[in-house]
Amino acid sequence: MAYARTACAAAAASSAANKNNLLAIRLYRSLLRTAKPFDASSTSPNAKILFSLLHRSGQENPLPPPRTETSDSTQDASASRKANMEPKSEPNEESEMIRTIQVPKEHARDLSLSYLELQRLQYEEEKFGDDATELYSRKPDPRRPPPHMILFRALLKDVVAGPLENDVTTSSSMGTMMNFPSHVSSKDTDRLKDVIRREFRGGELSKSSRFTENIQREVAFLALKELHRKKAYAVAGEVPMEDDEVVIQEQRRRNQRQAAKNVEPLKPLIPSVYVQPCTYLVAHPLMTGYFSRSVICILDHTDAKDDPDTNSFGTDGGTYGLVINKMGVGPTGRDRMLSQVIRADAVPEKLRDAFGDCSVREGGPVNVSLQMIHVATPDQDVEHGIGGNVLSMIPPTNSSSSTTTENGDDDIPASTAIESDAAIYFRGDVLKGAQAVLDRKMDRDNFSFFVGASCWEAGQLESEIQRGFWLPCRGPPDICFTGMCDHNTDDVNNRIHNNDNKDTGRLVTGIVAGTKQSDRPRADLWLSMMSANGNDNATLAHLLINEEYHEDTEACDDF
């Protein structure tokens, strides 16, 4: 009887093992099949766009809070700016010491704790002499995600950012966190199927092997569900999974119509090269928070090694720029006026008379005093002495005066003047500008005002660019001044309607008389800048433009 019971138990165990193996094989094949449209080496026409949707790293706050400054001349910033101005805690000697501790490999492989938590435990062990077994067996924080989500996020980080030298402990804080389609290569998209194969085959590099079989299956089903959700979302947004020449060509024409004129991406270089005046930074479509769908123009950058006397940021260095596509909104829902953002007792009468009812844009979450950008001819600059720094268009890398478009036309000038000899200035004397307006020597439309700024400490912006939060590009300085752009609508419509008429005109709102409503570009600077940076980037932006992205919505999974 005992032998029979043992034999039955062994048979049951063998049957269960066979069922588990069969389930694992089916899951493996289903995941590879579902992942195929995300692979650029397959026939999927939009693989890079789908891959870019796999963006979440599991970090609650992917962007560090910007540096904050105060000014006595400004009123309380809007609630949206306040929410992004949390003060950073100053590092103390103990916290700096903890971050230098090397955690033993056998403990560093524990994915249930963050590497910083493991460093702190190691620090406590060395400082207080606690028993290591007791330290590493402490109950986890109840707020910590469940084990299957910990494993899922760790695997997703390997897909999005790539594993760092087989070290499972550091990929959570390093590497690319978001991907623009134009920056995605076939090698990048290969990582999805490579991670699937690695985890199912097991071995030393497999992260799943450190978890139970139940957790492994739960993660496999979760991955399968999320891949299907991404595909369904893209299909609902008319992004085809298979070659559909009609749809693809229509999307390409739409993207060309929307593209900002005289704007082009900067060639892939090290991030520090991008950080210079008149570089435009376009926010990733999946970025949330204050900078969602923002376009920033960098106005100044200094390194810590620069001369402190000429360094705008003192001895520390840093980057200063402005969000250029967000109008300040007052309590009534209308544009905020200059007289509303500056306290009455802090506004000189001359300034109030000249610019009091001028609209003010939101320049960023850092609370700084009123800032002005103005346009002036050389004669006006000499006559009125407003001064300031000239904002010059970044020259193309292949020429000092122009760049060649896809059509072979050298039509993107590198000078600051686009249609006249006027130049764009920032940091000018606002009182002298007010006097020129009151004397009727200059028009109020020659001046643009901002409240708030976007500032980064030395190296901070370079890190954000490297991690995929911003797309750097070059364009005319007047985009910074107006917050609007021209479009190539005339050329695109001529090709669409087989019309040889080459009549052109300046387009501020992007609407051309005589065009169909569906042919008109949207009056959205962020969308136009994305569309000017490549067809895939444009398609991703159009896919997400009508979505309010939050981490608990279907369109934006909490990875």
Image (tube, helix red, strand yellow):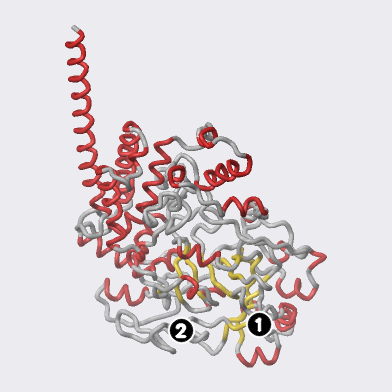
Give how far apart the Cα atoms at labels 2 and 1 are.
21 Å
Q: Residue 529, percent across and down?
A: 44, 68
In the drawing, does residue 192 fall left or right of residue 413? Answer: left
Q: Earlier in the sequence, mark 2 or mark 1?
A: 1
**Left of 373 or right of it: where is 135?**
left
Report the residue marked by disc 2.
Answer: 395
- Residue in the foreground of this view, choosing between 305 and 511: 305
Compared to 66, does 207 lie above or below?
Answer: above
Q: Quadrant of the C terminus?
A: top left
Viewer can see residue 544: yes
Which residue is more in the foreground, 3 or 514?
Answer: 3
In terms of secondary structure, where does tag 1 sit?
loop
Q: Which residue is mark 1?
A: 388
Inspect the image, locate mark 2, and give the three-letter code of the amino acid beneath it: Pro
Dot 1, crowdedness within 10 Å: few (<14), some or many (≥20)? some
162 relative to 336 in the view: left or right: left
At a point 60% along the width and 75% down the height, the residue shown is 302
Q: Amino acid at mark 1?
A: Gly
Q: Nearer the viewer, residue 453 or 26?
A: 26
Q: Secondary structure at mark 2?
A: loop
Residue 309 picture quarter:
bottom right
Residue 400 location (% of width, % of height): 44, 89
Where is residue 109 shown, x and y percent of the image? 42, 44
Q: Position of residue 209 (x, y in %)?
A: 33, 39
Q: Residues within 10 Å of mark 2 (few under 14, many from 20)?
A: some
Q: Residue at x 27, y 81 (%)?
A: 500
